[in-house]
Image (cartoon, rainbow, N blue to C red):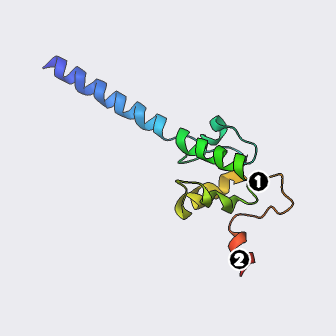
Amino acid sequence: MKSVATIVGLLATLLMAGQALAAKQAPASPIDINKAGVEELMSLPGVGPAKAQAIVAYRDATPFASTDDLANVKGIGQKMLAKLAPFVTVSGSADVKAPGTAEKAAH
């Protein structure tokens, strides 16, 4: 019986450690998506290695003019864009817009 209790205790500890690792801390200041590397992009909420690579690949072909352009990256929809908006910024364009303004400006 003692070994069962030990195993249950170890499993509970591993579960708590996994949850702590899964809940990464958002960046303290906005990340420039036109300059950030894969590692830095992975610090964004909901962005793992595949999405970070997709962001870099998109940027290499077409630099971001606004944060709204993230919605053009495979795997990033409007919900993800809304989650990322407070943590990202763009540079390198005179046409840089604040999140959510590209659609309003077009109308």
33 shown above or below 83: above
Q: Which residue is labeled 2 in the image?
A: 104
Where residue 10 sits in the image (x, y, percent)? 30, 24
Amino acid at dot 2: Lys
- Tag 2 secondary structure: helix
Q: Is residue 80 left or right of residue 11?
A: right
Name the foreground residue: 31 vs 19.
31
Residue drawn where x is 64% and y is 57% of the image: 70
Residue drawn where x is 46% and y is 36% of the image: 20
Amino acid at dot 1: Val
Residue drawn where x is 64% and y is 45% of the image: 57
Q: Residue furthest top?
A: 3
Q: Residue furthest bottom?
A: 107
51 shown above or below 100: above
- Tag 1 secondary structure: loop
- Of pointers 2 and 1, the one earlier in the residue sequence: 1
Residue 90, label in figure? 1
Total labels drawn: 2
